[in-house]
Image: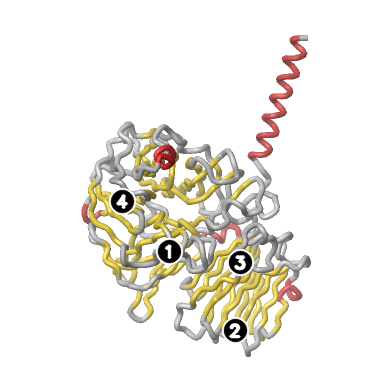
Amino acid sequence: MRILNFLSLLLLLSSCIIVKKKYTDSSFDELYRPQVHFSPPENWMNDPNGMVYLNNKYHLFYQYYPDSTVWGPMHWGHAISKDLIHWQNQKIALYPDSLGYIFSGSAVVDKNNTSGFGKDDKVPLIAIFTHHDPKGEKAGTNDYQNQSLAYSLDEGTTWTKYAGNPVLKNPGIKDFRDPKVMWFEAGKKWIMTLATLDRITFYSSKDLKSWEKESEFGQNFGAHGGVWECPDLFYLKHNNENIWVLLVSINPGGPNGGSATQYFTGQFDGKNFVPYQTDTRWIDYGPDNYAGVTWSNSGERKIFLGWMSNWSYANVVPTEKWRSAMTLPRDLAIEKIEEKYFVTSHLVPELQTISKTATGQKNIPASDYDLTSKIGKLSGPVKLEMSASQIENFKITFYNLLGDKLILGYDKVTNNYYIDRTVAGKVDFEKRFAAKHTAARISKNANLQLTMVLDNSSIELFADNGLSVMTEIFFSAQPLNSIRIQSPDNFLINSLKLTPLESIRR
């Protein structure tokens, strides 16, 4: 009898293990599941963290809660890619501990072993993150967020938290978080860009352990509709000049409500950031690109990735096993218009790894053009490119037979691009989700150039060489598999190119 019970127990345990494995190694075929964007196999994900390039691998760490599909005690999830497109999920990198949850931060390759963590000729990978103490927060203190370190000597597979944590203690600021660290070669020192309430504070260190305050920026610049978060500081080359860029995410206060990321251009001398601009600019005008930062250790190439959601509704979107995805990676560059510097975003060329044979069309009168009747219905994600020598009013409708419609277009009167997801599918989970969102057209050129990527539950728009960018999520009952282009004007499309994209899940 005992033998039978033991065998029964073994069968029960093995069946549980099989079920768990099947759930974890999901086929990623659930309704709404992105097919060309990174999403966690299951449960909650938000901000990208610790993005670093090392030995031909791109590491993506991210805010993760492994026990639910809503936000909870934060861990660092981990994934690795060789091409920025296909990702391999790894085991959880950092777990909460006695100092608190593991909030957002960054990672650097300490090539010169300034930290002293390296040994046996192994170069240390250093994670710098915010320890968030929930007990201190609940008690009403103002010093419950502090900066800490962890290091890895095996390329991020295992981590050791520094025994001297925290390395930067809170001086009494309620919001004191999200350290983004970079090496400033001219000063031979590390620079930490930290979100501190409604501004940015810069700190410096020679060894990543001892930090000194350098300066503050932002009290009288930019948008202040919400707390400042997830900053990033780097430079981009433009005509042999280094243009420094400071990214700052803000929640709420975005141009279309809720979360968004603003940017500043200027100069940085190792101590002070001096802006070129006084106006507010956004890296992405859509409602669903937040907390984005760039990969470190990637040389002069700056690759950006954002969290594809919005705190207005992130916890209630109608996905079941998983919540949230990341944007597609984007190369950032500088374009100068008149005397102003603007940051542009471009899809990384690595997207070619999943590009199938393209279909092209030329010289299309677009008063009412049914693209589907020419090429057939879409069978998966696509990249759509369109150009015209003269921009006019137009709209592109992505739709299905159930009546779901996502409308993207341009309004010449307001000089705005727009995306309307009002009737794009399920919207009743949050009262502000169903809306038409706009992005200012920054380009002064008469011609038009658009690139769009449509996935199962998102669209990303790059207009005018990436000057105006929008990211939107939506939840249609079936994939949007048809396209129609319409214009009340004499709108001639010079070229139209549709490239099917292969799922990264297969």
Amino acid found under the numbered disc labelled 1:
Gly
Please, is residue 212 above or below residue 488 in the view? above
Quadrant holding the N terminus:
top right
* CB atoms of marks 1 and 3 within 8 Å: no
Please, is residue 194 above or below residue 102 in the view? below
> Would residue 109 be found to the left or right of residue 370 on screen?
left
Q: Which residue is mark 1?
A: 225
Q: Which residue is mark 4?
A: 192
Q: Position of residue 17 (x, y in %)?
A: 67, 29
Q: Which residue is mark 3?
A: 383
Mark 4–mark 1 Cα distance, whole angstroms, equals 24 Å
Q: Which residue is mark 2?
A: 393
Mark 4–mark 3 Cα distance, whole angstroms, equals 37 Å
User: Which element type, helix, strand or loop, lies under badge 4?
Assistant: strand
Which badge, 1 or 2, comes first in the chain's sequence? 1
* CB atoms of marks 4 and 1 within 8 Å: no
